[in-house]
Image (cartoon, helix red, strand yellow):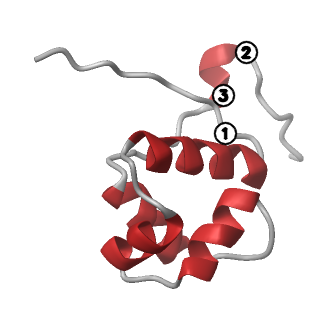
Amino acid sequence: MLTIMSTERIFTSKDLGRAIKAARTRRGLNQIELAQHANVSRGVVQKLEEGRGTVALDNALKLLHILSLDLVVQSRSDHGQDIPSNG
């Protein structure tokens, strides 16, 4: 079995929404089905995919889990993009 791993950098809520929508459609799920699997409302899926409004982090993590997506936090210092410190 071949596993294809891709990494997408997320900078905005719209970026996250596009990634979630792409994963959902690849799995052949509509918004209602995804919401049911994650035990959230369809509105949560809709808001997240559109990158608008506020969605509880717990709900976003549930959707990522159902879609077999991982949230990875990585230091930008590995890429020479440090934010200057205030001290």
Q: Residue drawn 71% across and 43% down?
A: 15
- State the residue at coordinates (75%, 60%): 50
Q: Quadrant of the N terminus?
A: top left
What's the amino acid at mark 1?
Ile
Mark 3 neighbour class, 10 Å CA radius: few under 14, some 14 to 19, many 20 or more: few
* Disc 3 target residue: 76
Q: Nearer the viewer, residue 83 or 40?
A: 40
- Between circles 1 and 2, the one closer to the viewer is 1
| Mark 2 Cα-neighbour bin, 10 Å: few <14, some 14–19, many ≥20 | few
**What is the spatial separation of the Cα atoms under label 3 and label 2, in whole angstroms?**
6 Å
Q: Which type of secondary structure does the marked residue at label 2 adopt? A: loop
Structural distance between the alpha carbons of marks 3 and 1 = 13 Å
| Residue 64 percent across, percent down from the top left | 42, 56
Q: Which residue is mark 1?
A: 10
Residue 45 located left or right of residue 80: left
- Mark 3 or 1 closer to N-term? 1
Q: Position of residue 33 (x, y in %)?
A: 39, 70
Q: Is 32 in front, or is 52?
A: 32
Position of residue 33 relative to residue 43, above or below, is: above
Residue 21, image x and y in percent? 57, 49
In whole angstroms, how far apart are the C-alphas of marks 1 and 2?
17 Å
Q: Which residue matches tag 2?
A: 80
Residue pictured at 66% horizontal, 52% vertical: 17
Task: Confirm or deny contact between disc 3 and disc 2 (CB under 8 A).
Answer: yes
In the rendered structure, which amino acid carries the disc numbered 2? Gly
